[in-house]
């Protein structure tokens, strides 16, 4: 009963956060400069990607390098869905939002299915072999899209309706954080953590390790697909070049920087790196050289040398605040 009350209290807290998101969308976002509004929305999409990848890499101990592939699947499926029906919903805002929501879910489910069929055989691998397979999967998705005329091939897919806004993006960001935070604290999440800490010991005590890995892979792929759909309906254009290896690498850096195993660390790192990327844009325009990946690589090296476990390690911000409170009292 006590646990149930805690869950209800926590759910009430998260619903309050969602209410604040939509009030901010209506009351504040119309007055914010469109450029800064775009950075805020991209930060929300980065939060979904980083937290979902952290469930695979940080909490289950796998090393997936194909997250951009799942994002591409969700983005293209969602965009195709809304493009096919957009002529039927012009002028009806409620129907537009319903179609957009269904398109996002369809994109997420498609990415999850692809994640299942890819993950089931490949997650029997470990370490470097798994990383190579997932990297290859991401490239296969990109090459397939590059050769599909229905999604524009190398020309890209244009004319995607702009349905993503602050409210939708941060609603799904809050849902992603809440879902991952809750699942890590359930028996399913404990199975994920046992696989990360010692897979052989987990198998010895009866934990179905392959099933746990596939579950985390499918959940992570689902949220990456959602992020892809939100991204497509914000940018209004998709190209295979957007989902190359660099995109997967950016998401991995967010997870490593924040701390593999820390959800709040992933949120902080996703916001920081998204803002940093835009802050470096004037420097790129001056020099004509894309310095982001160079700086990202240097940042990763410095973090590995100074804080091998990332900014927060496996801890959450709430745990750090509690330890400070105990020291102060």
Image: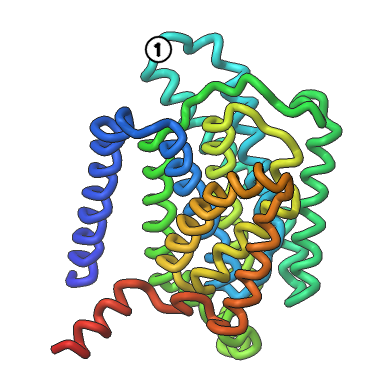
Local secondary structure at mark 1: loop
Please give the name of the residue rendered at 44% of the width and 53% of the height, measured from the top-left corner. Answer: 176
What is the crowding at mark 1: few (fewer than 14 residues within 10 Å), some, or many (at least 20)? few
In the picture, residue 10 is in which quadrant? bottom left
The quadrant of the picture occupied by the C terminus is bottom left
Q: Nearer the viewer, residue 235 or 64?
A: 235
Please give the name of the residue rendered at 82% of the width and 25% of the height, measured from the top-left corner. Answer: 149
Q: How many marks?
A: 1
Q: Position of residue 1 (x, y in %)?
A: 18, 69
Display colour scheme? rainbow
In the picture, residue 213 is in which quadrant? bottom right
For residue 182, above or below residue 200: above
Please give the name of the residue rendered at 58% of the width and 80% of the height, measured from the top-left corner. Answer: 196
* Left or right of 254 on screen, residue 115: right
* Left or right of 48 on screen, residue 206: right
Q: Position of residue 67 (x, y in %)?
A: 65, 55
Residue furthest to the front in view is: 286
Q: Which residue is mark 1?
A: 92
Q: Position of residue 297 (x, y in %)?
A: 68, 67
Please give the name of the residue rendered at 62% of the width and 37% of the height, measured from the top-left corner. Answer: 75
Q: Position of residue 29 (x, y in %)?
A: 32, 33
User: Would you say residue 197 is visible in this rendering?
Assistant: yes
In the picture, residue 265 is in which quadrant? bottom left
Q: Nearer the viewer, residue 152 or 217?
A: 152
């Amino acid at each position: 009963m006590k646990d149930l009350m805690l869950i209800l209290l926590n759910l009430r807290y998260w619903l309050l956060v969602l209410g604040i998101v939509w009030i901010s969308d209506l009351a504040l976002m119309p007055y914010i400069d469109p450029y800064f509004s775009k950075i805020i929305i991209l930060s929300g999409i980065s939060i979904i990607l980083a937290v979902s990848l952290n469930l695979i890499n940080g909490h289950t101990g796998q090393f997936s390098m194909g997250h951009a592939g799942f994002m591409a699947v969700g983005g293209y499926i969602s965009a195709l869905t809304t493009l096919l029906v957009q002529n039927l919903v012009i002028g009806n805002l409620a129907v537009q939002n319903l179609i957009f929501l269904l398109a996002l879910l369809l994109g997420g489910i498609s990415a999850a299915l692809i994640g299942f069929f890819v993950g089931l055989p490949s997650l029997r691998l470990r370490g470097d072999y798994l990383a190579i397979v997932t990297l290859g999967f991401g490239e296969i998705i990109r090459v397939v899209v590059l050769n599909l005329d229905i999604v524009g091939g190398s020309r890209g897919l244009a004319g995607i309706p702009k349905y993503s806004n602050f409210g939708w993006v941060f609603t799904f960001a809050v849902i992603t954080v809440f879902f991952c935070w809750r699942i890590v604290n359930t028996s399913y999440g404990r199975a994920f953590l046992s696989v990360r800490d010692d897979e052989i010991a987990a198998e010895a005590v009866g934990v179905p390790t392959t099933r746990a890995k596939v579950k985390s892979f499918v959940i992570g792929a689902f949220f990456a697909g959602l992020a892809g759909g939100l991204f497509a309906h914000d940018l209004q254009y998709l190209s295979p070049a957007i989902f190359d290896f660099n995109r997967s690498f950016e998401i991995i850096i967010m997870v490593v920087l924040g701390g593999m195993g820390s959800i709040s660390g992933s949120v902080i790192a996703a916001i920081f790196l998204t803002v940093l990327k835009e802050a470096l844009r004037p420097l790129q325009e001056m020099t004509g050289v894309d310095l982001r990946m160079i700086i990202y690589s240097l940042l990763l090296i410095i973090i590995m040398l100074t804080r091998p476990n990332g900014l927060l390690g496996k801890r959450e911000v709430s745990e750090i605040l509690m330890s400070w409170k105990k020291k102060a009292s």
